[in-house]
């Protein structure tokens, strides 16, 4: 821990000496590209230099959300979220995937910490971006051909959320009660034999039984918990936010399987399209003053920029 503190201390010193004034800390590569575009949209017109730092760029080279939140807490403790050094006012903002923190009531509160509106950044991009245009660009097909493949992107996302609703409920309960019976957000649905089809009730039942035993509650209590969790998922879908509890990283797998099940336009490139889509969606960010992907983040970012 001593080495980590000293390393962070040296890193803070480098921030103080930098010409940048707004520093954004993010979990990984995709986040770095996304927030670099978003902050450029806000900072460049005001003559404020920004810097986006992925967790693996920090001393210790540990990536991911746990490192991000640990660094946030360290900066908060040291009074480094907003400060003045060498006559330069500076502010730090941390961009975190929401994951299931809202469901589990683990969200931290700070104007310097902004959570994604959906489960993660990928879920946000698929919701707010132009999926049809991104699909066309990723596959090397026309927009019209992409529209014929996915006529209604929101309906497609709703269908995915509803098909995997039982798996999401199992994963949320596992997170809430901090037990691991194999139903985790790190895995694709294990209860949907066909990823695009309905769940297998016998497989759902197997995970329910395992969770009931691990949590050490009665089956009636578990069914009440499962019912209330499913209701929250369904409510998010009806409210128009189907990706609130749906892990966006699952979507690359689903869209790949979906496209492979559809008629392929001549010379279309479906190889690895699921992985490419997120990067292509990021390229749409900040291209106009009313960027839908930026809207969730702009109010908090603008407040910080105005403070500099």
Image: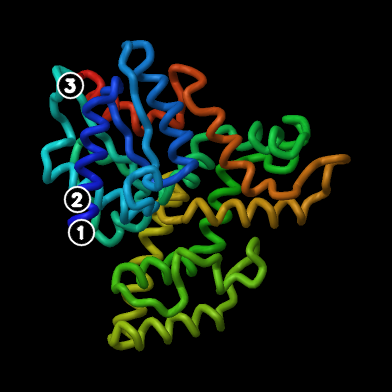
Number of numbered markers: 3
Q: Nearer the viewer, residue 206 or 84?
A: 84
Residue 117 showing in the rendered view:
no
**Residue 259, position as x, y percentages in the image:** 73, 50
Asked if one can make out residue 83 in the rendered structure from this viewpoint, the answer is: yes
Q: Position of residue 108 (x, y in %)?
A: 21, 49
**Viewer-proximal residue among 9 and 195:** 9
Question: Above or below — where is 53 with respect to 45?
Answer: below
Question: Between marks 1 and 2, how big is the CA–CA gap?
Answer: 6 Å
Q: Pointer 2: residues within 10 angstroms few (<14), some, or many (20+)?
A: few
Q: Earlier in the sequence, mark 3 or mark 1?
A: 1
Mark 2 highlights which residue?
A: 5
Numbered label attached to residue 1: 1
Q: Residue 89 carries which label?
A: 3
Q: Is residue 301 left or right of residue 122?
A: left
Structural crowding at the residue carrying mark 3, measured as other residues with C-alpha within 10 Å and reported as few (<14), some (14–19) or many (≥20): some
Q: Do the residues labelled 1 and 2 touch (CB within 8 Å)?
A: yes
């Amino acid at each position: 821990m001593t080495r980590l503190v000293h390393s962070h201390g040296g890193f803070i010193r480098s921030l103080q000496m930098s010409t940048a004034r707004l520093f954004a800390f993010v979990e990984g590569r995709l986040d770095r590209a996304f927030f670099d575009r978003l902050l450029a949209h806000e900072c460049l017109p005001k003559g404020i230099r920004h810097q986006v730092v992925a967790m693996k760029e920090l001393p210790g080279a540990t990536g991911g959300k746990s490192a991000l939140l640990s660094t946030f807490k360290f900066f908060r403790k040291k009074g480094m979220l907003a400060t003045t050094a060498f006559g330069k006012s500076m502010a730090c903002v941390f961009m975190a995937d929401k994951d299931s923190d809202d469901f589990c009531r683990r969200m931290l509160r700070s104007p310097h910490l902004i959570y994604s509106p959906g489960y993660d950044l990928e879920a946000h991009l698929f919701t707010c971006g132009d999926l049809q245009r991104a699909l066309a660009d990723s596959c090397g097909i026309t927009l019209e051909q992409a529209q014929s493949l996915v006529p209604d992107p929101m309906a497609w996302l709703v269908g995915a959320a509803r098909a995997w609703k039982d798996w999401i409920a199992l994963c949320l309960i596992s997170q809430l009660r901090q037990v691991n019976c194999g139903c985790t957000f790190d895995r694709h649905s294990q209860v949907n034999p066909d990823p695009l089809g309905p769940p297998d009730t016998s497989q759902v039942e197997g995970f329910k039984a395992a969770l009931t035993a691990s949590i050490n509650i009665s089956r009636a209590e578990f069914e009440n918990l499962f019912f209330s969790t499913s209701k929250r998922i369904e409510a998010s879908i009806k409210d128009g936010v189907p990706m609130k509890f749906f892990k966006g990283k699952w979507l690359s797998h689903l869209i790949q399987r979906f496209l492979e099940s559809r008629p392929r336009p001549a010379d279309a490139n479906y190889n690895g399209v699921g992985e490419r889509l997120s990067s292509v969606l990021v390229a749409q960010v900040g291209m106009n003053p009313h960027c839908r992907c930026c809207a969730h983040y702009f109010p908090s970012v603008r407040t910080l920029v105005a403070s500099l």
